[in-house]
Image: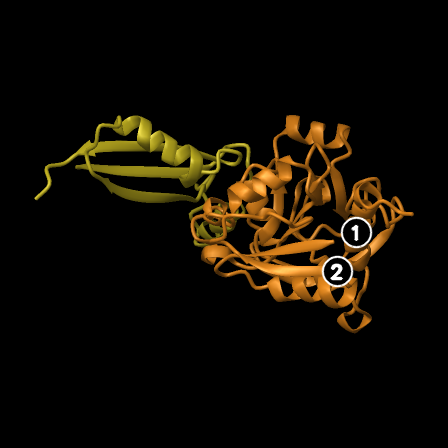
């Protein structure tokens, strides 16, 4: 499986993402600059964390108009797995690939710590290697992760089981319904504030993020690779 | 030329944590009469006159980029000015 890591000006988790895919997952991966105009040949698209365009105006608001974004939208519409982590999630929200918006954290502070998450839905292509209700530990590092959507959207998210991860026991940022990560209606676009790519090795304090990437690969192999 | 002033605020039903923090600071300065503080953004745009309707153009700018209408409301004022 071949992944693209989209690099925006101000991305700073692109190398972590690349490392997770190449060294821990053992799959192919390439950096794709925001100026590129094609994602041809990639089986998975990764939007990394960071501070694209300095978070000017709003987080993700300017990155969303990058040359590469129409290609990301096209890939998402075609069913290619698209994962946005942290700033990548914010970009997906601004691009309208996921519903809702981010507010500043409830306590206005930038929070950088390990959080405990609950796997709410393990039937998505991003979570199938986890158990339903499994508690996992992933780090967060953000100032705007306070997810918000209107009541109607929340009802849809719940009815369609689009909430993939929620904060367990302690909600660090005030997000609605403790939401930490959601998928789109088709289930092939996941946005999440916690960083699975920073939790792929025991040396990093947790390897609970690895199963997320393994889920993507397993699902892709089951769908596209003919086994003999 | 046009001078356009754009005002963006969080929607009324969206909690404004910055506003809440400033409100409590004002209370501690003994301005207890302050009931609500909403913090927003103010932008000034200078726009050349073109064939496109200025109102349509500014509205599109607000809808697509300047405001995130999921959580923000916007309003704007357009003033025609004579270029120097």
Q: Colour of chain A?
A: orange
Residue position marked by numbered label 2 in the rendering: A27
- Location of mark 1 (residue): A217
**Which quarter of the rendered picture does the N terminus of chain B lie within?**
top left
Residue at (47% x, 39% y) in the render? B36
- Seen in the picture, residue B43 relative to A77 is either above or below; the reply is below
Q: Position of residue A41 (x, y in %)?
A: 64, 49
> Are the residues flagged by discs 2 and 1 in contact, CB closer than 8 Å?
yes
Residue name at image x 44 percent, y 50 percent: B26
Give the number of marks. Answer: 2
Labels 2 and 1 positioned on one and the same chain: yes
| Nearest to N terminus: mark 2 or mark 1 | 2
> Which residue shows up at 26% across the image and 29% down it?
B54
Helix or strand or loop: what does disc 1 sit on?
Answer: helix
Residue at 43% across / 35% down in the picture? B64
The chain in yellow: B
The answer to whether residue A146 is left or right of residue B63 is right
Quarter of the view holding residue B49: top left
Residue A43 place in picture, x, y as percent: 69, 48
Q: Where does the C terminus of chain B fall, quadrant-wise?
A: top left
Which of the pair B29/A174 is nearer the observer?
Answer: A174
Res A178 quadrant in image: top right
Task: Name the element at disc 2.
Answer: loop
Residue most toward the left? B84
């Amino acid at each position: 499986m071949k992944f693209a890591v989209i690099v925006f000006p101000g991305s700073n988790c692109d190398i972590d993402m690349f490392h997770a895919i190449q060294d821990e997952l053992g799959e192919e991966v390439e950096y794709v600059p925001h100026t590129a105009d094609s994602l041809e040949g990639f089986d998975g698209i990764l939007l990394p964390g960071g501070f694209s365009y300095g978070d000017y105006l709003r987080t993700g608001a300017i990155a969303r108009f990058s040359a590469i974004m129409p290609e990301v939208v096209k890939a998402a519409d075609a069913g290619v797995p698209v994962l946005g982590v942290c700033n990548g999630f914010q970009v997906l929200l601004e691009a309208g690939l996921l519903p809702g918006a981010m507010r500043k954290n409830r306590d206005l502070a930038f929070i950088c710590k390990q959080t405990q998450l609950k796997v709410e839905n393990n039937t998505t292509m991003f979570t199938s290697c986890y158990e339903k209700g499994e508690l996992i530990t992933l780090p967060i590092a953000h100032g705007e992760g306070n997810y918000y959507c209107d009541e109607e959207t929340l009802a849809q998210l719940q009815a369609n089981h689009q909430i993939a991860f929620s904060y367990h026991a302690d909600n660090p940022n005030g997000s609605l319904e403790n939401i930490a990560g959601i998928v789109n209606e088709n289930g092939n676009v996941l946005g999440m504030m916690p960083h699975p790519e920073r939790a792929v090795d025991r040396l990093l304090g947790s390897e609970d993020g690895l199963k997320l990437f393994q889920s993507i690969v397993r699902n892709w192999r089951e769908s596209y690779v003919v086994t003999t | 030329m046009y001078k356009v002033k754009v005002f963006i605020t969080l929607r009324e039903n969206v909690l404004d944590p910055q506003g809440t923090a400033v409100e409590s600071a004002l209370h501690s300065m003994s301005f207890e009469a302050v009931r609500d503080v909403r913090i927003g953004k103010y932008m000034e745009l200078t726009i050349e006159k073109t064939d496109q309707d200025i109102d349509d153009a500014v509205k599109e700018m607000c809808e697509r980029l300047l405001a995130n209408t999921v959580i923000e409301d916007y309003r704007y004022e357009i003033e025609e000015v004579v270029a120097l």
